[in-house]
């Protein structure tokens, strides 16, 4: 059993910052925390940022330069530092992990709500 738990969401004004965390627990042998996604009502879940090694990261164009993804493998925690938040960043944010050995499952957290509003 693998559990991913996001935290750090909340209400923030435009231009503000938040840091999301994703903690992995359970049978996490060969499970890598891989990325952050977000979803708003009526829309498909979209990629926000991914990390495949400490130095290889990828960002959606809409968050490039404002968000930073990082990972602490010793603690099995992944972060998303979000700066200069905009109204359109409002969404439920999910973290994703994946097992790198058979059966190669993907794992998702239940999400944390980020609301950007004045």
Image (cartoon, rainbow, N blue to C red):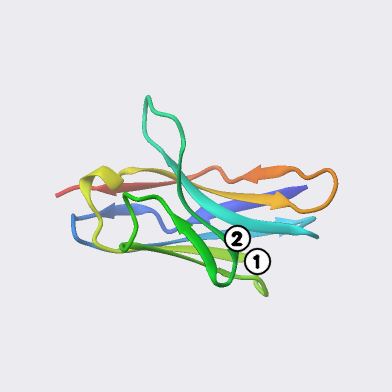
Q: Is residue 72 above or below residue 100?
A: below
Q: Residue furthest bottom?
A: 74
Q: Which residue is mark 1?
A: 76
Q: Quadrant of residue 66?
A: bottom left
Q: Quadrant of residue 24?
A: bottom right
Residue 39 in percent (x, y) is at 42, 37
- Estimate how packed mark 2 is, as few (under 14), some (14 to 19) or many (20 or more) residues with alpha carbons within 10 Å: some
Q: Looking at this view, is 48 or 29 the one in front?
A: 48
49 with respect to 4 (left or right): left
29 with respect to 15 (left or right): right
Q: What secondary structure is marked by label 1?
A: loop
- Estimate how packed mark 1 is, as few (under 14), some (14 to 19) or many (20 or more) residues with alpha carbons within 10 Å: some
Which dot marks residue 23? Answer: 2
Q: Residue at x 35, y 50 (%)?
A: 61
Q: Residue at x 54, y 72 (%)?
A: 55
Q: Looking at this view, is 17 or 104 the one in front?
A: 104
Q: What secondary structure is marked by label 2?
A: strand
Q: Is residue 8 above or below residue 70?
A: above
Residue 17 in percent (x, y) is at 29, 64
1 with respect to 47 (left or right): right
Q: Are marks 1 and 2 in contact (CB under 8 Å)?
A: yes
Q: Residue furthest right?
A: 102
Q: Residue at x 40, y 50 (%)?
A: 60
31 with respect to 37 (left or right): right
Q: CA distance from mark 1 to mark 2?
A: 6 Å
Point out the tag, 1 or 2, that comes first from the N-terminus.
2
Q: Residue at x 58, y 53 (%)?
A: 5
């Amino acid at each position: 059993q693998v559990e991913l738990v996001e935290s750090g969401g909340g209400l923030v004004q435009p231009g503000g910052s938040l840091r999301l965390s994703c903690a992995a627990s359970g049978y996490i042998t060969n499970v890598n925390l891989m990325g952050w996604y977000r979803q708003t009502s009526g829309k498909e879940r979209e990629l926000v940022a991914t990390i495949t090694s400490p130095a290889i990261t990828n960002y959606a164009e809409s968050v490039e330069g404002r968000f930073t993804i990082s990972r602490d493998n010793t603690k099995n925690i992944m972060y998303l530092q979000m700066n200069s938040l905009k109204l359109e960043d409002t969404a439920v944010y999910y973290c994703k992990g994946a097992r790198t050995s058979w059966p190669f499952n993907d794992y998702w957290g239940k999400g944390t709500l980020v609301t950007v509003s004045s």
